[in-house]
Amino acid sequence: MNNQILSDKNLQIRETIPSLTIVVPCYNEAEAFIYCVQALKAIITDLVSRQKIQQNSHILFVDDGSKDNTWLQITEAAKQSHYVQGLKLSRNRGHQTALIAGLSVVETDICISIDADLQDDTKCIEQMVDKYMLGNEIVYGVRNNRSSDSFFKRNTANIFYGSMSAMGVNQIENHADYRLLSKRALAALLEFKEQNLYIRGLIPLLGFNSDKVFYTREERVAGESKYPLKKMLGVAIEGVTSLTVTPLRLICALGFLTCFFSFLAIIYILIAKFTGQVIEGWSSVIISIFFLSGVQLLSLGVIGEYIGKIYMETKRRPKFFIDEKTNIKLGHWE
Ligand code: UDP
Ligand code: MG
């Protein structure tokens, strides 16, 4: 290891060529798979030939319980190229869990996670490796803009990031799960034992030196998004509840506010009563009942989310089961 120090971040330039695993979670990606495997194989071959990464680098496809022939395609690709590895989960567990399943069997010096639909610019892989060589442990792939997203997705994403930062959560804006992790950063990530994972929220908690590469996100190369509104909402709720308890504090603040205004109303009503005025009853009573019932149900819902989370966490259930594998030795998993 060279001791050359780069001034700003105290980075140490690396000199040893790393081995790389590209981890790709796939759920019903039969249509996109062929494009994905071709593009990633070309990149790995190129980087190996230019001695940017070692020969024992891989592309690890994690089949997240697909119902189409994704797994068949993975096994065929693995027969044709020693770079291709496959892992099949016993059933669909969701993107984040599929990603963790893949990451937890990685044995190379660095790993890069990327989606199967080639929305993330694969040219950044080389830039990520370069930034790793400069001494970074984490390199985030960050989108330049969200122009390829629908109006709805763009705005809901803005609201989500806006409210997360208002709640004091440190997130990398416009970064999803396209990133490089060094062996150290990956080991640290795998120390997080929570059941419901929101990986992109956990990474900034790791610390370590990090950098970003910027890219424009393209449309899906083929197939459809596996993130319908319901799943997106699930991920957003997971993100909030796993990273902050601010919503619980907001309930408290809301309670204080309601008490304060009720106190003012009480004074007003008492003064009115003792000065002989008649207060119109019906509307004000109904409005208060509706308003307070809404506030209470909302608050109970938020508290319920956290209690539900505690319940799920206490069960300590296994996150996933590996059903099949191809071209990969699983070390301690076997
Ligand atoms: N994915 C997965 N399990 C799921 C849903 C999605 O492994 O239950 C994978 C999917 O195959 C893709 C990545 O997660 O590689 C991101 O999904 P998608 O591209 O559909 O999400 P979007 O880009 O539309 O947010
Ligand atoms: Mg996508």
Image (spheres, helix red, strand yellow):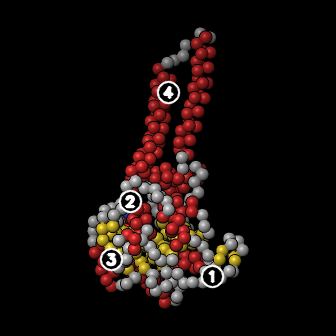
Instruction: Point out the tag, 1 or 4, that comes first from the N-terminus.
Output: 1
- Residue marked by disc 4: 288
Question: Quick one: 33 or 251, which is closer to the camera?
Answer: 251
Residues at marks 2 and 4, CA–CA distance in whole angstroms:
45 Å
Instruction: Point out the tag, 3 or 2, that comes first from the N-terminus.
Output: 2
Residue in the picture at 68% in, 72% down: 10
Q: Which amino acid, mark 1?
A: Met
Residue in the picture at 44% in, 36% down: 297
Q: Quadrant of residue 326?
A: bottom left
Residues at marks 3 and 1, CA–CA distance in whole angstroms:
35 Å
Q: From the viewer's perspective, is 273 left or right of 54? A: right
Q: Which amino acid, mark 4?
A: Ser
> The N terminus is located in which quarter?
bottom right
Q: Quadrant of residue 131?
A: bottom right
Q: Which amino acid, mark 2?
A: Lys
Determine whether label 3 and label 1 are within 8 Å by CB. no
Residues at marks 3 and 4, CA–CA distance in whole angstroms:
63 Å
The image's mark for residue 319 is 2
Instruction: Point out the tag, 2 or 4, that comes first from the N-terminus.
Output: 4
For the residue with label 1, is its CB less than 8 Å from the closest atom of ligand 1? no
Res 174 seen here: no
Residues at marks 2 and 1, CA–CA distance in whole angstroms:
37 Å
